[in-house]
Image (tube, rainbow, N blue to C red):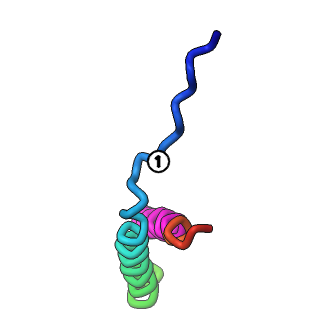
């Protein structure tokens, strides 16, 4: 006979979902605003592709996980 299976549990407690959603979305929005301000205020000669990619990528990750935790806290 096979041993009884263990239940799959979340590594993050359910009570933390709303807090994580707010914090991650706030960080993502701040980074997005920083990206847009950088794009609007710097000239084409002074822009750095690496900085744009890093800022956009990190903002995208925070907004993505923030949206995930928002949906999880809403029970979707």
**Residue 62: x, y in percent?**
44, 66
User: Residue at the spot x=62%, y=68% of the render?
Assistant: 76
Q: Farthest residue to the bottom: give it.
A: 41
Residue 66 in the image: state x and y as whole percent.
Answer: 47, 69
Element marked by disc 1: loop
Residue 49: x %, y % from top left = 46, 66
Residue 60 appears anywhere in the view: no
* Camera-nearest residue between 65 and 6: 6
Residue found 40% across the figure and 87% down from its top: 37
- Give me the residue at 43% from left, 59% from top: 14
Residue 31 image-quadrant placement: bottom left
Quadrant of the rendered image containing residue 71: bottom right
* Magenta stretch bounds: 50-69
- Taking the magenta stretch, the answer to whether it contains residue 68 is yes
- The quadrant in which residue 54 appears is bottom left
- Crowding near pointer 1: few (<14 within 10 Å), some, many (20+)? few
- The front one of 16 and 27 is 16
**Count of marks overlaid on the render:** 1
* Residue 70 located within the stretch drawn in magenta: no
Q: Report x, y in % for residue 52.
A: 45, 69
Compared to residue 71, the image places residue 32 above or below, namely below
In which quadrant is the N terminus drawn? top right
* Magenta stretch prevailing secondary structure: helix
Name the residue tied to disc 1: 10
Residue drawn at x 36%, y 63% is 16
């Amino acid at each position: 006979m096979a041993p009884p299976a263990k239940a799959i549990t979340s590594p993050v407690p359910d009570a933390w979902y709303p807090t994580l959603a707010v914090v991650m979305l706030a960080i993502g929005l701040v980074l997005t605003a920083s990206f847009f301000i950088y794009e609007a205020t710097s000239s084409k000669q002074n822009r750095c592709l690496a900085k744009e990619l890093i800022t956009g990528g990190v903002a995208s990750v925070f907004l993505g996980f923030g949206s995930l935790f928002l949906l999880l806290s809403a029970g979707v």
